[in-house]
Image (cartoon, rainbow, N blue to C red):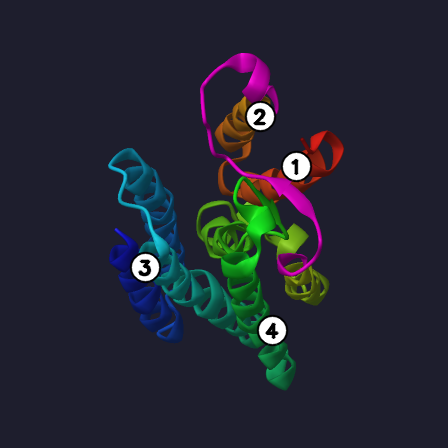
């Protein structure tokens, strides 16, 4: 499953360089399922270990580091930003720093310090899908300011922000109330706003974490 995540990232890079950002976004969606699933399956069958953790980070660097950076570069280039578009590769650099930090930071066994790379990538992947399937939102996000904000937003990858992880030791309401409420709100937002809900959900995730950090 982890190698499947990596494969999605590699093919997504090819699609991006060919200008098919929509297909790249769908591949990111599949990679997200595999990335979540590999950890869940590893814990379920008790085969988690340092090898899997390192392999997971290497795969994530491609799918949730190099790929979103290249997508942002393409989006900036298409918008006529020229050489400024190369700033998008800060996303890859910051993702590498975030993943290296995560592997060594013992504080992040049950929660996160800094925005996870998949969360940052989800925002970027939502943009081509919004352009294709929800063009009514193009006037909101398709401008140079938003492009710059999204690149700057990636600095949250290495920020000292305490964020909760969607890991469940049990499924009791009392100990998981914040997570359940967040998931329910996310489902409702997706039902009503579809792809446009993704940036809102990530923003809500950060806000809820900061307010109700356990």
**Residue 113 in the image: above or below residue 192:** below
Expressed as whole percent of the image width and height from the top left, the position of residue 132 reads 44, 52
> What stretch of residues is rendered in magenta?
156-178
Quarter residue 143 falls in: bottom right
Mark in front: 3 vs 4 = 3
Task: Decide: few, some or many residues near mark 1? Use Cα within 10 Å; few <14, some 14-19, many ≥20.
Answer: some
**Residue 3 in the image: above or below residue 72:** above
CB atoms of marks 1 and 4 within 8 Å: no
CB atoms of marks 4 and 2 within 8 Å: no
Task: Decide: few, some or many residues near mark 2? Use Cα within 10 Å; few <14, some 14-19, many ≥20.
Answer: some
Where does the C terminus fall, quadrant-wise? top right
Residue bearing the label numbered 4: 90
Task: Decide: few, some or many residues near mark 4? Use Cα within 10 Å; few <14, some 14-19, many ≥20.
Answer: some
Q: Indicate which disc, 1 or 4, sits on the residue closer to the N terminus.
A: 4
Q: Indicate which disc, 1 or 3, sits on the residue closer to the N terminus.
A: 3
Is 164 left, or right, of 103 in this rendering?
Answer: right
Does the magenta segment cover residue 177?
A: yes
Does the magenta segment cover residue 105?
A: no
Q: CA distance from mark 1 to mark 4?
A: 24 Å
Residue bearing the label numbered 2: 185
Is 185 left, or right, of 146 in this rendering?
Answer: left
Label of residue 204 in the image: 1
């Amino acid at each position: 499953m982890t190698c499947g995540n990596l494969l999605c990232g590699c093919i997504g890079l090819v699609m991006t360089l060919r200008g098919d950002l929509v297909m790249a976004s769908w591949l990111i969606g599949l990679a997200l399922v595999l990335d979540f699933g590999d950890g869940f399956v590893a814990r379920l069958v008790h085969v988690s270990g340092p090898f899997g953790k390192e392999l997971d980070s290497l795969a994530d660097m491609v799918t949730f580091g190099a790929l979103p950076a290249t997508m942002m570069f393409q989006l900036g280039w298409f918008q006529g930003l020229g050489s400024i578009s190369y700033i998008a590769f800060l996303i890859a650099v910051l993702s590498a720093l975030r993943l290296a930090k995560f592997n060594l930071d013992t504080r992040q066994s049950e929660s996160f310090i800094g925005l996870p790379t998949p969360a940052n990538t989800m925002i970027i992947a939502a943009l081509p899908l919004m352009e294709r399937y929800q063009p009514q939102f193009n006037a909101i996000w398709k401008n140079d300011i938003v492009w710059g904000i999204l690149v700057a937003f990636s600095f949250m990858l290495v920020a000292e922000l305490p964020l909760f992880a969607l890991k469940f030791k049990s499924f009791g309401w009392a100990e998981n109330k914040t997570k359940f409420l967040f998931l329910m709100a996310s489902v409702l937002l997706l039902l009503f706003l579809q792809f446009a809900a993704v940036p809102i959900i990530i923003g809500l995730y950060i806000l809820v974490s900061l307010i109700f950090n356990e």
